[in-house]
Amino acid sequence: MANPLAQLTQQPDPAASKQQLVEALHQFGQTLQQLQLVPLADTSQSVTQRIQQFATDWGGVLGLVFMGAIVYVLWRTLKLMPRTKPVQIKPQANLQIGWEDIAGVDEAKFELQEVVDFLQDPKRFQRLGAKVPKGILLHGPPGTGKTLLAKAVAHESGAQFFAQSASSFVEMFAGLGAARIRRLFDEARKAEPAIVFIDELDAVGARRGSDMNSEREQTLNQLLVEMDGFSSSGRLVVMAASNLLEKLDPALLRPGRFDRQVFVSPPDVRGRERILHVHTRNKPIKEDCDLGIVAQQTSGLTGADLANICNEAAIFCARRGGHAVSQQDFDDALERVVAGVQSSTTLNDHERRVVAYHEAGHALCRELLMTVDRVHKISIVPRGRALGYVMNLPDEDSYLKTREELIDQMTVLLGGRVAEQIVFGAVTTGAANDLQRVAEITHAMVHDYAMGTGQETSNTAIIDREALSDLTRRIRDEEQQELAFEAQRTAWGLITSHRDTLERFAEQLLEREVLERPEIDEIMAGVPRIDRRPGLPPLRIAASMKTPPAQPG
């Protein structure tokens, strides 16, 4: 078809050109109407479709790369993990602990000395058919010297000594703890005869089935096999230390694994004095310093506490510029260890009076009752969390308590609260710790010692508390309340009948803030002590004498 626009440009006549232009536009409009719009195919894709297409094409390759990255990370983690190697302590090394440095634990030292003698001279025991104990378990409260005894054995035995903490056997990776157990015993067997010491055994030796830690149980199983399995040789002694004997697995405690279980108890008064002499060897001591008095003042403290007291006394001496440690330095150190650091708490006048009468109530009940220890020092100077305190001085160590003695202890504990109620007509929050200790004593008297007032609570102790009925629990709760009320009535009677003595204690405390034993004797002059113990029946000797009587000459 000819182009009308091209024809229009070839004719010069304007009228004809106009007519042709109209016809050309008309034909062009018809041509546009005949045209059809055909949509073109969309070649572009969305982002989601592109990702799906890429995952389809390269998914297998990415999976292999990801698995390879995981393997690489695990390999690098294992390479970077610290390799816990058993610590081998060389015998006769310098700066080690000897038997002369051990005091206050004579029974445990005697048990370990037998093992040392066996390793040093085995023929003396073997000719009689004796075998060295396979295992010795040292257990007791923290700070009594269990690890110190192991160090002394390492120094004195002359045998190869391997030490490792039980916590290093417990790992998050399966089988790693058992592998470390095998490595420890393998290295020890290469140096037989040898001693293996495992500190804090309860970290790996807890009773099986008590938790869902299968890795720890697998490590314990490996330890049981190494101690008394097919691979045991009998020339390896295993020593261990633990503070929680009741949580250890029974298979670990049986003879053949730990043949001897040595209880390392806190020292008595003579043991504490020997411990103080050991820790003051390298310290200049004044002649007026009596370590025997310090030993009497530290009843119930362990060897670690006594070592800390000796060190604090030396620090106090250095602070004041002294050249020798005095008795006052030991007194200050004892107060810091037992009561805490002197705080900067400022009390108003009313609070000082409340604290003074509170501590006076404690001291008065303690001085009046003969079954409790007498007061050594009273203070209303805040130390640590306490706004005041009363220190006692026991005449001797006691290990058995009667029902009356426990009641008297609770009477002393409640004496401060009763004094507040008598003097001020109200009680404060200062007796929170006293009430907590009273609750512990009453609970032990009813549930553990069978010292209740009723027939059901005075003949039997509780073994399984979960098996008690609601009625029995209610009866025992009432018994605990009755015991506490009995102690409170006793304290109320003592304080009301000696109100003038209470006032003298409080006045002296408000004036001096600290009362020592001489001032306490002046206040209690002429006041008789009370013995609430029932009459004791005559004793019957049912045991033979240790030594035969001397023959007459």
Image (cartoon, rainbow, N blue to C red):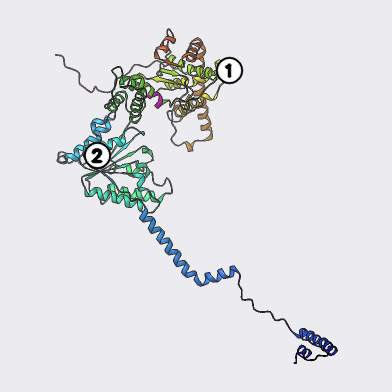
Residue plotted at (35% across, 46% down): 168
Residue type at the position of mark 2? Ala
The residue closer to the viewer here, 3 or 100, is 3
The residue closer to the viewer here, 541 or 30, is 30
Q: Main secondary structure of the magenta part?
A: helix
The residue closer to the viewer here, 210 or 316, is 316
In this rendering, does residue 454 appear at all?
no
Q: Residue furthest right?
A: 15
Q: Is residue 196 left or right of residue 351?
A: left
Residue type at the position of mark 1? Gly
Locate the N terminus by quadrant.
Answer: bottom right
Q: Which residue is mark 1?
A: 425
181 to 487, vertically: above or below: below
- Whole-percent x, y for residue 537 in the image: 36, 17
Q: Which residue is mark 2?
A: 154
Look at the image and say whether residue 334 sits in the magenta stretch: yes
Asked whether disc 2 touches disc 1, contact meaning CB atoms under 8 Å apart, the reply is no
Residue 75's image quarter? Answer: bottom left
Q: Which residues are magenta?
A: 333-337
In this rendering, does residue 183 appear at all?
yes
- Whole-percent x, y for residue 510 in the image: 49, 15
- Whole-percent x, y for residue 49 in the image: 58, 70
